Structures are given as C-alpha cells and as structure tokens.
Image: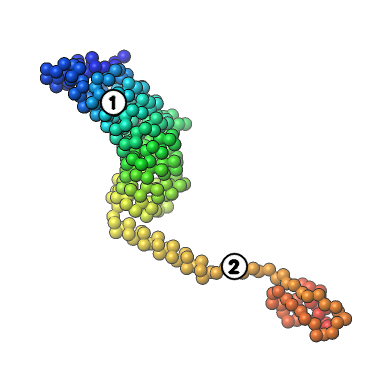
C-alpha cells in the first residue's frame, strides 16, 4: 500500500529540487502546494508538519478514506477526484476551504461539510453509483452551504429531483447534466437562485418538455448560458413581455366572464288559502311565467283562483 507521508515527499524529485539546503522539517513547513496526483496513493499518512499547506492535489489515485487532514487549517483547494472515496470525512477543521473536488468517486450522500462556511465550489460529478442509487444531500450540509456556495456540479448521478437544493441562494453556476430530472418543481427551485448565470441540464428528460428553454429563460432572469448555448438579451425581453401579455389576456378574460350564475329553477311561494279573496300576494324567488309554472300544483291553483 502506498501512503502519502513526509518520507514520500522527501523522496520526490520534484520536491527535492525545491529544498535548497533547508532541513526536511523547515521545507515541509514552507510548503503551500503539494502535487501527488496519479501516484497510486491509497492512504494519507501524517502530514502535520505541512501546516501551511493551501493547495493539495491528490486526484487520480486509489484513496478510499479522507483522513489525517485536520492539521490543514489553511487549506483552500482540495483535489480528490477520481479516487475510491465512499464517505466525506475529516474536513471539519478546514475552515478556509473554498474549492472541493470529489468527482468520480463512490459517494452516495453529501455530508460532513457542516463547518465549511467558506466553500464556494463543490464538484461531485460522475459518482460511480449503482442504478438503484442516487446522490443525496444532507439537509445540515445544505444549510451551511446556502450562504457561500456559488458553483455546484452534480452531473451523471441518477438524480431525479432537486427541491432540497433551493436553499442554495448564492448559486451562479449549476451543472446537473445526464441525470433524471423531470419538469416537476424545477422552475420553482430555479426561482430561488437569483444569481444564476450558467446552467447545464443536457440529457435530462425535462429538456424534451414543451418550451423548456423559453420557460427557464423567463424564470432565471440573469441566466447567460443554458445547456452550452448563450442567451440573447433580446430573446429574453421578448419572452418576458410575451408572458406578461399572456397573463394580462387571461386576467381580462376572467373579468369579462364574471361570476357564474346559478341555473336552479327553485322558487318560493307564499302559501295562500284557496278560499281567500283573489287579491292575494304571491312572491317568487326566480322570475316565473305570468301564467304560473308546470312544476308546482299550487301555482296552477293560484292561476285558477285568478
């Protein structure tokens, strides 16, 4: 098993050239960037001497667990894509982390990010999941990311709905291509993202629905690019005015139609004595033919008395 340790760093020709007469301890403390991608690394060892590390490249390895990173309180960029990671662990001390790359792993639940209040980019595309699995988000993590996350990539993760993501009000770039998103609630979610500039939903069933592109352009008023195609501002203004005009016509039609009129023929007759004088009084609730109505025997009797 290949471990990423300080000994491995010391043996690296790339890092050895930068040592320049410093002791190993001094050199490790001076490190801000560490490049160990595509090195068949399976585990992360003790790197606590690298306390000033800000960027760590560990993509394209065989890492299955995230640990031994609690020392890296200055880390801002962490590249762990294309490993074998199943759970997101040991990131709670990385308070300055702004970009996290976890695409191409085996993560089914996005969690453990509750203390990363400065995270602006989260890359989770292409998780290696079974057909029965789909990428899910822990509500606590979403609430933490709501005020900071600007970029979210969740392509090809069997996702069929995104209502929980509505809380991410600062999103500017959203990519969820190759999922199973339908029309249900999509527009309502997008209406909660006023900062959205770019979005990619290619390969989802929703893309085949009627006026899909037109509807999303109207909902996302600042959107500049949809599914890789730029949005013309004249087109946007036309669609917005067309929607307003359509709504005005619908409202006018409702006003002209007025309230519905009951069609019931029910009426009320004041009872009278057949032997009373002809000068009786009769009140009908609805307008009835002067000769009486055929539905009431009492009306016929009144006619005969008249």
Where does the image place residue 228, in percent across and percent down from the top left?
30, 45
Q: Residue, x 76% and y 79% (percent of image)? A: 282
Mark 2 or 1: the one toward you: 1
Foreground pick, 147 / 282: 147
- The CA distance from mark 2 to mark 1 is 70 Å
Residue 50, compared with residue 191, is above or below; it is: above
Pointer 1 local density, CA inside 10 Å: few below 14, some 14–19, many at least 20: many
Q: Vertically, is 23 above or below 265?
A: above
In which quarter of the view is residue 68 placed?
top left
User: Mark 2 packing: few (<14 Cα in 10 Å), some, or many (20+)?
Assistant: few
Relative to 220, 27 lies left or right: left
Q: Residue at x 77, y 72 (%)?
A: 295
For the N terminus, which image quadrant? top left
> Where residue 297 sits: x, y (%)?
81, 74
**Residue at 20% over, 20% down:** 28
Label 1 secondary element:
loop
- Furthest residue toward left: 20
Nearer the observer, 250 or 227 = 250
The residue lying furthest to the right in this view is: 275
**Residue 26 position in % (x across, y down):** 18, 19
- The image's mark for residue 72 is 1
Q: Nearer the viewer, residue 78 or 256?
A: 78
Mark yes or no: residue 275 visible.
Answer: yes
Is residue 8 depicted above or below 268 in this figure? above
Give residue 86's quadrant in the image: top left
Spot occupied by residue 245 in the image (x, y as percentages of width and height) = 40, 64
Judging by the rendered image, the residue that carries numbered circle 2 is 260
Instruction: State which tag comes first along the sequence, 2 or 1.
Output: 1
In what element is the residue under mark 2? Answer: loop
Q: How many marks?
A: 2
């Amino acid at each position: 098993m290949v471990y990423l340790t300080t000994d491995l760093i010391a043996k690296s020709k790339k890092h050895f050239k930068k040592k320049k007469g410093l002791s190993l301890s001094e050199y490790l403390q001076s490190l801000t960037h560490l490049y160990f991608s595509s090195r068949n690394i399976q585990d992360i060892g003790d790197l606590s001497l690298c306390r000033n590390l800000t960027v760590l490249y560990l993509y394209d390895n065989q890492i299955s667990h995230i640990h031994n990173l609690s020392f890296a309180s200055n880390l801002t960029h962490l590249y762990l894509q294309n490993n074998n990671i199943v759970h997101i662990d040991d990131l709670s001390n990385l308070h300055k982390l702004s970009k996290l790359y976890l695409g191409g792993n085996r993560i089914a639940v996005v969690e453990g990010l509750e203390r990363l209040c400065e995270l602006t980019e989260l890359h989770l595309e292409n998780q290696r999941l079974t057909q029965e699995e789909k990428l899910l988000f822990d509500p606590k993590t979403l609430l933490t990311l709501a005020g900071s996350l600007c970029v979210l990539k969740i392509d090809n993760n069997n996702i069929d709905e995104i209502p929980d993501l509505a809380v991410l009000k600062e999103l500017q770039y959203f990519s969820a291509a190759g999922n199973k998103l339908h029309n249900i609630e999509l527009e309502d979610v997008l209406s909660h993202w006023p900062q959205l500039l770019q979005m990619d939903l290619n390969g989802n069933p929703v893309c085949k629905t009627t006026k899909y592109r037109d509807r999303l352009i109207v909902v996302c008023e600042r959107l500049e690019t949809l599914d890789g195609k730029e949005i013309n501002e004249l087109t946007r203004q036309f669609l917005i005015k067309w929607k307003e005009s359509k709504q005005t016509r619908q409202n006018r039609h409702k006003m002209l139609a007025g309230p519905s009129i009951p069609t019931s023929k029910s009426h009320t007759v004041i009872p009278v004595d057949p032997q009373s004088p002809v000068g009786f009084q009769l009140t009908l609730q609805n307008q009835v033919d002067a000769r009486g109505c055929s539905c009431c025997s009492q009306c016929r009797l009144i006619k005969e008395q008249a």
